[in-house]
Structure formats: C-alpha cells, structure tokens
Amino acid sequence: MHQPSRGGLGLSLALLSAATFGTSGSFAASLIEAGWTPGAAVTVRVLVAALVLTLPALLQLRGHGPLLRRSGRTLLVYGIAAVGGAQLCFFMAVEHLSVAVALLLEYSGALLVVGYLWLRRGQRPGLLTLCGAAVAVVGLALVLELAGNTELDLVGVLWGLGAAFGLATYFVLSAESEDALPPLVVAWGGLAVGGAALAVAGAAGVLPLAAPRTDVTLLETQVSWLVPVLGLALVAAVVAYVTGIAGARLLGAKVASFVGLTEVLFAVAFAWVLLGQSLGIMQLTGGALVLAGIATVRADELRSPGGPGAAPVFTPHEEALAAQP
C-alpha cells in the first residue's frame, strides 16, 4: 500500500509541475505583445523566482552546510544545463525553426532520459516503454500541428537538441535522492545559477533583452506588467520547479520525463481558455495519444521487474543506487 501511495503522490506532483509550467506561455504572451523579448521574459522569471526562494532556502539550509558544499557541482550543472541552457537553446532554436518543431525537439529529451538510463545505469527499456514513447511522440506532433511543416534548419535542429539535453538533465538530476538537498533548495540553487547564466548571455548580446515597463493585456484586461511577471515567477517557476523535483524523486527520471510531456497539453489548454485559441480535432486526438503513451510507460515501470509490488522506480532507492559511479 505504501508504494502505490508514493507513486500517486509523485504523479500528482509531476502533473502539478507540468500544469504550472504550462501557464508560462499565456503569461509570457502578454509581455511579448507589449514589446518584451522572450529572453527578457524568461530571464526575469528565473531571477525573480530565485529571489523569492532565497529566504526559504536559507532557512532549510541551516545545519546543512557540508551537504550544500558536496552538492555544489550538481547545482552548478543543474542551473547551467537544466535551467539556463535549456531556455537559451530553445530560444535560439526558435530563431531558426517554428515554435512547434522547437518544442518537439526539446521534449525529445524524454527519449534521451530513456537512453541515458539504459546506457549509463543498465535500465534497459521494455517493449511497453518503447511503444509508449512512440505513441507519445506521435501525439505530441499532432498537438503541435506539425503536419505540412517540414522546413528544417540544421542550426536550429542542433539548438533544439541542446534544449532536449537540458530537459533530460533536469529530469535526471531532479530524480536523484540519496544524500540530496531538499527540492526547494535545489530549485533555488538551480534558478539562481540559471538566472545568472541567462543574464550573462543577455549582457553578451547572445540573448536579446528588452522589457518595456508598460501595461499589458491579460484576459482582455489592461494590467500592470508586474502581474504576468509575478505569474511567471511564482506559478511557472517557483511552484513548477519545486513540485517537479519532488515528483521526479518519487517517480524516477523516466516516468517523470514522460509525465512532463503533459506540459504541452496544459499550455495548449491554457491558451484555449485564457487566450481564446481554439483546439482542433487533431490536437485533441494528439492529447489523448500523449496520455496513452505516458500511461503505457508507467505501466511498464509497474510490471518490471517483479511486478507491481516491486520497489524499483517508484522509490528513490533505485535511482540513488544507480546514480553511484
């Protein structure tokens, strides 16, 4: 009874993370329409979120100084690759590709997680996992309406794969649990490092930054630019990262990464509700396929090895043992 409850809690946290990550598009759209660059929106989002988490993180760190020092390299990699790198690579990819193609490439990071766990940790994917991955990718392509959009730019594809690597790093590092810092502290450290990296990229001119402080339109209402900024920072960053890390520790990197695909579904749904962007039958069908693929991957985890009663995947123990060099 203990394991299913952990799995259910992990799934709930992962879905909450995906849903809150999915709000970022609607909040950012109002800023971009008012003249903000995407790079400025995400940089402010990450830096404000890190600032908000600073005091709670410092309170949780009391008496854990040695653990923080041991985890310093992990936080550095997490911040640069999983937070800053993933964001920067995605925006660079969008300069060469459509947003839909860039998103598909970024979320192929779930497949990289499967490959990493197989090659690095010996967790060979089962047939159900492979089938679930294929179904989920097809569903994602339908949600993003990729039919007919075949123009690809090699540079853009490489940037998109860089975003996929950053996303895979996020799930792999988030799932580590042995001798690990609390999820809130990991989120704070990663956001602080990632925000600094994005700010440096902006200062160097790699990431265009423009942020006019003017009223914006949100839900057909004129509001201060602070409203979507706080939405991006508090909902789409603070809540999203903390619950995502906690969920990944309970589910394991592989299942968490596939549940993360629902972020695209939530983003489309929020755009439908908040921005009036209608959903077509193909997108609804694609959404159903993504959910079916995720369910298939999770079913494979429950049955391997030793059946649903076995402890792997849904306990942090397996991930921790596998992480040891």
Image (cartoon, rainbow, N blue to C red):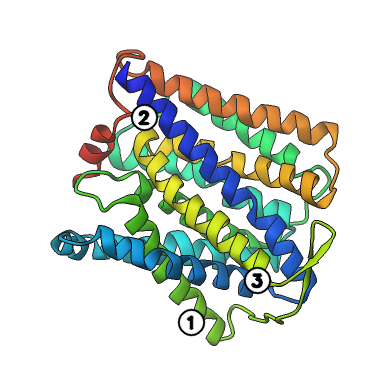
Disc 3 and disc 2: Cα gap in Å? 47 Å
Res 92 quadrant in image? bottom right
298 lies above or below 235: above
* Residue 51 locus on image (x, y percent): 44, 70
Kind of element beneath mark 2: loop
Residue that mark 1 sits on: 200
- Which residue is rendered at x = 67% and y = 80% of the image? 211
What's the CA distance linking mark 3 and mark 1? 23 Å
Residue density around tag 2, few if under 14, some if 14–19, many if 20 or more, within 10 Å: some
For the residues marked 2 and 1, what is the alpha-carbon distance in whole angstroms? 39 Å
Kind of residue indicated by mark 2 = Arg
Q: How many C-alpha atoms fall within 10 Å of the one at disc 1: few (<14), some, or many (≥20)?
A: few
Q: Is mark 3 on a helix, strand or loop?
A: helix
Q: Which residue corresponds to mark 3?
A: 226
Q: Secondary structure beneath disc 1?
A: helix
The numbered mark at residue 302 is none
Earlier sequence position, callout 2 versus callout 1:
2
Name the residue beneath numbered marker 2. Answer: 124
Residue at the image point whose x is 27% and y is 44% from the top: 177
Q: Is residue 210 left or right of residue 192?
A: right
Q: Where is residue 191 in the image (x, y as percent from the top left)?
A: 43, 65
Residue contact at pointers 3 and 1, CB within 8 angstroms: no
Foreground of the two, 255 or 104: 255
Residue located 72% across and 72% down the image: 224
The relative height of residue 257 versus residue 71 in the rendered view (above or below) is above
Regarding residue 46, the answer to whether it shows in the image is yes
* Relative depth, front residue between 246 and 91: 246
Residue 170 vs residue 311: left or right? right
Q: How many C-alpha atoms fall within 10 Å of the one at disc 3: few (<14), some, or many (≥20)? A: some
Q: Can residue 161 be seen in this view?
A: no
**Please, what is the three-letter code of the amino acid marked with disc 3?**
Leu
Q: Which amino acid does label 1 sit on?
A: Val
